Image (spheres, rainbow, N blue to C red):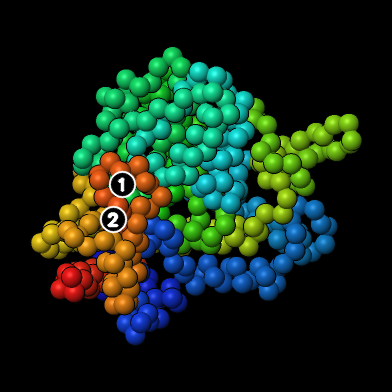
Amino acid sequence: MSETLVDIESIRAQFPILQREVNGKPLIYFDNGATSQKPQSVINAINHYYEYENSNIHRGVHTLSQEATSAYEEVRKKVQKFINAEHDHEIIFTSGTTGGINLVASSFGENLIRKGDEILITAMEHHSNIVPWQMLCERKGAHLKVVPISKEGELDLEEYERLIGPKTELISLVHVSNSLGTINPIKKMIDIAHAQNIPVLIDGAQAIHHTPVDVQELDCDFYVFSAHKMYGPTGVGVLYGKEELLNDMAPYQGGGDMIKNVTFEKTIYNDLPHKFEAGTPNIAGGIGLGAAIDFINSIGYDFIIQHEAELSRFATSQLRDIKGLRFIGTAKERAGLVSFVLDGIHPYDTGVILDKLGLALRTGHHCTQPVMTFFEVPGTVRASFAVYNTKQEVARLVEGIDRVKRMF
């Protein structure tokens, strides 16, 4: 599929929110790293569940429950195929990326980590891939080690290998940085870790909507992502884990649906995947995730990768000419976002003025405060792209930044 006006316009037409105005200006949405907008097909799938199938799942013999259960479990198979997991019971539905990381930290990590052990992360992690490991280390008397980054926003792979030692028990890595756009060489990093029998979790929150993911090819032990970054609803996500690891892990939460039998003396836990899915899940959200996968498949990653790469190149070339603008994160391998600061202008002020012009960008530390500390900035302005964004919108962003500079 080539990038033509009709292609982009047909895609944009599927997103109702893109038809609205903000402050009297057509909405230009460049905050896709925080959450993407939703196509009508996802909205329709959620509405259809509530209008025609609303019922709890797994526990009812009546028609509505059977239909809802079937719709929900079909999504699990769809996710399995989408990321090429070996089994559908390796797909655990969670509340999102953060929920998946906390599940692994509290279940797998709790049993694995002992006093004096080390957990290895990187300096570009989102807070959700820092804090759960800090909490685990505090509970266990373990140590958190950090792989440094360069001024370009790239990981130091030599230091990564050096930091892996006899006390390293777990490695947790971001696939794509949400504040720098860096695409990390996770396959190589996983192979290095596995050479020393160290399990690896990959935070794929910022990758899953930009690039295809094959968990068997990567050979990662865990992979987590959220629906709302990939054109789906909020409040639902996926934890992929290798079957043998998930089977050995204790349940993260107790309650309904994660049991086979309960007595006051002992509870027998359910099989995978239900062992980790206590209580009534976000059924509508899960069904919406399935519709989001259908949307991505209908466009194809070939087009998504090409289109977002062209947007990034165009944005970089246009913004580079603005005096006083400095990019934060210039890695060779980057996903569809640009992050920058303007000399003498706080990112918050930039964001407020751009909003008056109908431009929605993210400003601040992006839940990566250590990254901002490293680059010695209070925060950045981040424009993150999606399949419905256009070069015309990027040009409007450049005009908006010129307006910001004139005002200051």
x, y percentage for residue 327? 20, 53
User: 192 or 401: which is nearer to us?
Assistant: 401
Whether 21 is drawn above or below 81: the answer is below
x, y percentage for residue 124? 34, 41
For the point 54% across and 35% down, the residue is 135
**Amino acid tagged 2:** Thr
Find the residue positioned furthest to the top: 166
Q: Let me know if residue 240 appears in the view.
A: no
- Image quarter in which the C terminus is found: bottom left
| Residue, disc 2 | 380
On screen, residue 215 versus residue 399, left or right, reads: right
- Image quarter in which the N terminus is found: bottom left
For the point 59% across and 39% down, the residue is 103
x, y percentage for residue 292? 50, 61
User: 187 or 379: which is nearer to us?
Assistant: 379
Query: Toward which corner of the image does residue 347 lie, by quadrant?
Result: bottom left
Callout 2: SS: strand
Q: Residues within 10 Å of mark 2 (few under 14, many from 20)?
A: many
**Amino acid tagged 1:** Met
For the point 55% across and 43% down, the residue is 100
x, y percentage for residue 2? 26, 64
Callout 1: SS: helix
On screen, residue 169 versus residue 352, left or right, reads: right
Mark 1 to mark 2 CA distance (whole Å) = 8 Å
Q: Earlier in the sequence, mark 1 or mark 2?
A: 1
Answer whether labels 1 and 2 touch (C-beta < 8 Å): yes
Whether 37 is drawn above or below 377: the answer is below
Q: Residues within 10 Å of mark 1 (few under 14, many from 20)?
A: some
Find the residue positioned furthest to the right: 264
